[in-house]
Amino acid sequence: MTSQAALLRIENLSVSYQFGNRWMEAVHDFRLAIQSGQVYGLVGESGSGKSTVASAVMRYVPHNGRIERGSVVNFQGVNLVEKSLREMQQIWAHDLTLVPQNPGAALNPSIRIGEQLAELMRLQRRLPESVVQERVLESLHRVNLPDPRAILTRYPHQLSGGQQQRVMIAMALIPSPQMLILDEPTTNLDVTTEATILDLIETLIRSEGTGALYITHNLGVVAQLCDRAAVMYAGEILEDAEINDLFAGPLHPYTIGLLNSIPRAGQTKRERPLATIPGKPPLLQERPNACVFSDRCPLVIDICRTEKPPLESSGENRLVRCHRWREIEAGNVDAVYPTEIESDVAELAHREILLQAHNLSKTFNSQSTLFNVLGGKVSPPTHAVEDVTLSILKGRTYGLVGESGSGKTTLARMIIGLTEPTSGEIALMGIDLQGDVRQRSREVLAQLQMIFQNPQMSLNPYLTVGEAIRRPLIKLAQLTYTQAEAEARRLLKAVNLREEYVDRYPSELSGGEKQRVAIARAFASNPALIVCDEPVSALDVSVQSAVLNLLVQLQEERNAAYLFISHDLAVVGYLADYVAVMYLGELFEVGYARDLFSPPLHPYTEALISAIPVPDPAIRTDRIHLSGEIPSPAHKPTGCAFHTRCPHKLGQICEVESPPWQHHGNEHHIRCHRTPEELAQIQAYLLNKAKA
Amino acid sequence: MAAIDPPLPVANSPRRIQRLTSLRRFATEFFRSPQTAIGTLIVIFFLLLAIFGPAFAPYKANDQNHPVSHQPSAEYPMGTDYLGRDVYSRVILGARSILVTAGAGTLIAVVLGTFLGLAVGYQGGLVDEIIGRFIDAFLALPALLIALVILGVLRNLNPPPGSWQAVLSDRSVLVVIAIVYIPLVARVVRSSTLDVKTREFIWAAQIRGETWLYILFREILPSVAPALVVEASLRFSYAIFLVASLGFLGVGARPPSPDWGLMVNENRGGIYALSPWALNYPALAIAVLVVGVNIMSDGIKRIVQRG
């Protein structure tokens, strides 16, 4: 590693937190060097210590944490660890800034955006007020915010998440810092918004020659944005390399596992199942004084469990912490992870229709508060879901993709019976369903179950795992208590958890384990259809693939159909047999998963696919920019709902006329004013251009 | 999964240990601050008085065969009042009525308020809107004023002896406390319920077709319990104060019962100069008990809100 004139050089950094009377090391012997103009990725799962590194560099370590003696954070030749807070304030104000993960919490909710920016501007230099205002406006222009003058007078809550993050980036760039730390700046954003923010970050950093430390859990983002990256696990760097080396020839088994466990756009469960890394990261108090990854490593040998491997240089500009990297490099051993899908996934034969929804619509009227009712105030209704028709086949997975605000969850809630449709019918195996779950019979309830997005919220914290799983068994499957008890244990085993978990409380489980319990609970009544609402989006990368594969396996064993909802097209494409793309409450494209990707036809599908950050630095695509934000469903555009952001808009017809469904072979349907052939031509042209 | 997890020494032990330590931690945390410990000791002391009082009291509450306005002495530790009743015995015997009235009133308010709060919060919509406004309006009036109005009504019922109205009338202070505090408890429970009902485990219960009551009490109530405990302890301390105030105003316990508030009332004015002890000691008892309960509820609040 070149130490000459590194902008930021971290050496021997260790950070500990105090729990009770014990100090526990969260970051151990961390090192890294960032040059000016370099974007350095720091990849890790939650709890890996990556944010602790950021807070140590910024000196934001909380009260119960301390930076250990001997740690060096050398920034522009000075050791930040020794600085007083007063001195740090000067550094924060001029040279080193942070873009936080949650812009909503970082902006002061009671001060207008313009004032918050001006405050920072005044901190820089004494400037006349008119110049300050001018520069504030300039800074908003720079981050491509539409209508910056209007934004100046708004409060943070009046901006969308993407806009807030742009404001945060504008703030971080005000001092023209030498170095920028970005802590998961796009994690809470939609894929399409994420894509535009990433492009913005890239152009700004490149044009300013700023050094950047980019912290993320997303390998795709690292591949697309960074020059170099370090992989962190349980507080230690496991591998550190130039971005091309890291992705082309990873040397650490953990890196190899991570790269094989994320679904690529177009990858399906039938062709190449995902690798899963068994187990879970060690808890802070259980980290072994040996290789921290040894418990989950497929290449583990005796020495790994007794001795901590050193961070060795494996070649020019490359570091790896593994006892066996030489064998891996030479190709003598292969880090092979289990894929967990044992059965051969059956062919796409035509099956009976399980559930059919016809012209389903949901319109929300504005909040009927007493004041509004008495005052006679009526705001226009919101069309959350409009005229959706779909049929789900027995034992198959129906994928539903769309950005947040597209109405996916409302559609799911209507099918499950939690939200009553305004119009339209739902039929289960040919029998009409009541709109309200309270009017459905026990037999119907047992057939329809749901898995939720947030494992923290989907289990009652005051009920044990056993109580949670036994309840549907007793209530819906009408088992006796003893039968339910035995069945609950069987279900736990089916989702790869130990039987003893029946007595645990949710707070004693990790996120992935909670989601497994939620899956077990959903399967308890032996349902024919399970609605999965973003079941993996809140999970860590190494756990995600295991849960996805578990869903595939259970489907094979129990012949349940899924309605699988996600904002991530790669995940939906991997799991689903048939996919529907949703935008502002309407379906725009439906078809078999494999047909949807090669190439995408509908402009919105195309934009969604190109927005996915590909975890391969060799493919740095020109992303399609969807201009602006997703419109609010309350003010839906006329004609084709997508026309305001469409890159291939045809003309006036898109603004006035709702596009018709067009058939494109093999149950592939597209709603667009352009013909499928025309769209295919556009795709072929774009592909050729990209190759040239 | 391929990897075999390392066996635990004893099945389930982490949870048991965790529960035990958390209970122990609760106790140590609770008594860490000396104030909390003192407050709790005061409350325990008065509880013992309420239970075993009659065994300690040297005389009957209304035994008037003593010298009138006798100053405190070995025979009459707190002196006697203007009717020749032993103040010491009356203070001891008064503990039961104030604790029972305040305690039972609070208990009823907590039970009914919890039910109302859960139901209204979970139901939401127009029901919540309307009942919520009623509760707000109720809270805008001073508790004492409402108590006086309700007491006035109950007192004037003149029910035939033995009827349920008579029972109500005899326990009028208890009823008043329950009525005054139901909206307060309901409001606290409602706001916690609003938060909990948006969690996905509630959806899961609805999808299972659980009944309304099951969702309220099995799924929501446990999450609301911490806030409820804090509110209940706070209500109890205010209830004691309210019982004493009503007694003092002459609308609570009726003479000649040994009610502390009533004793303060009877011995003020011109009589005070003759036997100041007959007012001072019951007043002191009220003050010490209210302060004790308050400190204790502060301690409970501190722990519950931290955990």
Image (tube, grey):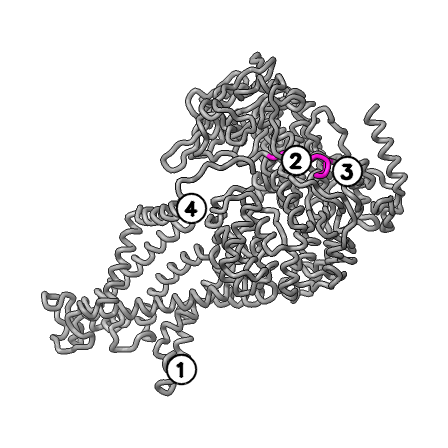
Query: Disc 1 vs disc 4: which is toward the camera?
Result: 4
Q: CA distance from mark 3 to mark 4?
A: 50 Å
Please indicate, yes or no, whether residue A493 appears anywhere in the rendered image. yes
Q: Report the disc number at residue B165.
A: 1
Amino acid at pointer 2: Leu
Mark 1 surroundings within 10 Å by alpha-carbon count, few (fewer than 14), some (14 through 19), many (20 or more): some
Residue at the outermost front position: A343
Q: How many numbered marks appear?
A: 4
| Viewer-proximal residue among B294 and A580 | A580
Residue at (76, 57) in percent of width and height: A357
Query: Disc 1 vs disc 3: which is toward the camera?
Result: 3
Range covered by the magenta-colored residues: A267-276
Amino acid at pointer 4: Asn
What residue is pinned by disc 2? A274
Quadrant into which the N terminus of chain B falls: top right
Q: CA distance from mark 1 to mark 3?
A: 74 Å
Residue B31 location (% of width, % of height): 30, 49
Amino acid at pointer 1: Gln
Q: Quadrant of residue A619?
A: top right
